[in-house]
Amino acid sequence: MAGGFLQVNFGGFVPLSTVDWPGRAVCTVFLRGCPVRCHYCHNRDLQAGDDRRDTEEIIRLIGSTRMVVSGVVFSGGEPTMQKDALVALAEASKKMGLFVGLHTNGVYPETLRELIGKQIVDRIALDIKATWEQYPNLLKVRPETTGRIRESLALCREAYADGRLPGFEVVTTIFRGRENDVPVIAREAEGVDFVLQQGVEGMIPPLSFDEIKRIADRLNRPVKIRTREDGEVVYDKNRIIIAESIVLTDIMQARRNT
Ligand code: SF4
């Protein structure tokens, strides 16, 4: 605790973002460090390194945007890797009256448990990056890490179902050649919002919006499709395409009621 304050390994700050929490203007705080090595990572410079700051400095940064944003999103790297710092930042943000969002790979369920237990997180976007069997080879994680991600999924689902977590979505980034993984991963997202995010990697042409729609058609459920070309679109082959972010579980509930 140099300088008398809790320290955070800082990765960056975006004072205004409309993409990190679709439908809400937020600031985004990137925390440095990640134990996973995704082949497609776009934030490789945040996977490691050291830029220690007082959490008070980051809280001031968040506070400086208070007049133009209604929320803050913590991203990375992997923000839950720094449990104490993230909890302190989320607590301070809630005290400012901000909604708190989190993007996570789920490797640290103990951090999620504390954030949810203290009711200082409003929305979690949890990545499920592959089928469970593929995690160790594809993402260079130890086999036991997969169990920790499953634990995160289970506790988020439970908190979302009982109302302690107001917003929850499962995000999978999809690539050409891995289309058949999606129905398997979709089973893990039953009953919660499921996002199909266009993966972009090297020279491999990314799946187009129409190609992702065809994958979604096999799921027989509404999804959110995120592409560079079209942003986020809510897609349900049985109904309509809605070009704005809404909660998919509302559509699923409406389906059940019709
Ligand atoms: S979990 Fe996120 S930050 Fe970590 S390697 Fe994967 S994409 Fe990059």
Image: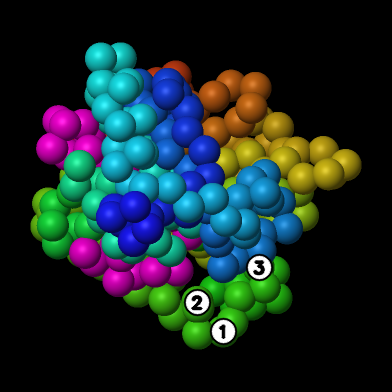
Q: Is residue 191 left or right of residue 143?
A: left
Say whether residue 24 is magenta: no
Of 162 and 179, nearer the camera is 162
Whichever of callouts 3 and 2 sits on the residue coming sooner in the sequence is 3
Q: Is residue 207 left or right of residue 74?
A: right
Q: Which residues are magenta?
A: 93-114
Give the residue at mark 3: 139
Look at label 3 and name its amino acid. Leu
Q: Identify the disc placed on residue 250.
A: none
- The quadrant holding residue 114 is bottom left
Give the residue at mark 1: 143
Whether residue 145 is visible here, answered yes or no, is: yes
Look at label 1 and name its amino acid. Pro
Q: Identify the disc placed on residue 146.
A: 2
Q: Quadrant of the C terminus?
A: top left
Of 172 and 38, nearer the camera is 38
Q: Quadrant of the N terminus?
A: bottom left
Report if the beta carbon of the residue with label 3 is closer than 8 angstroms to ligand 1.
yes
Q: Residue at x 25, y 14 (%)?
A: 67
SS at mark 2?
Answer: helix
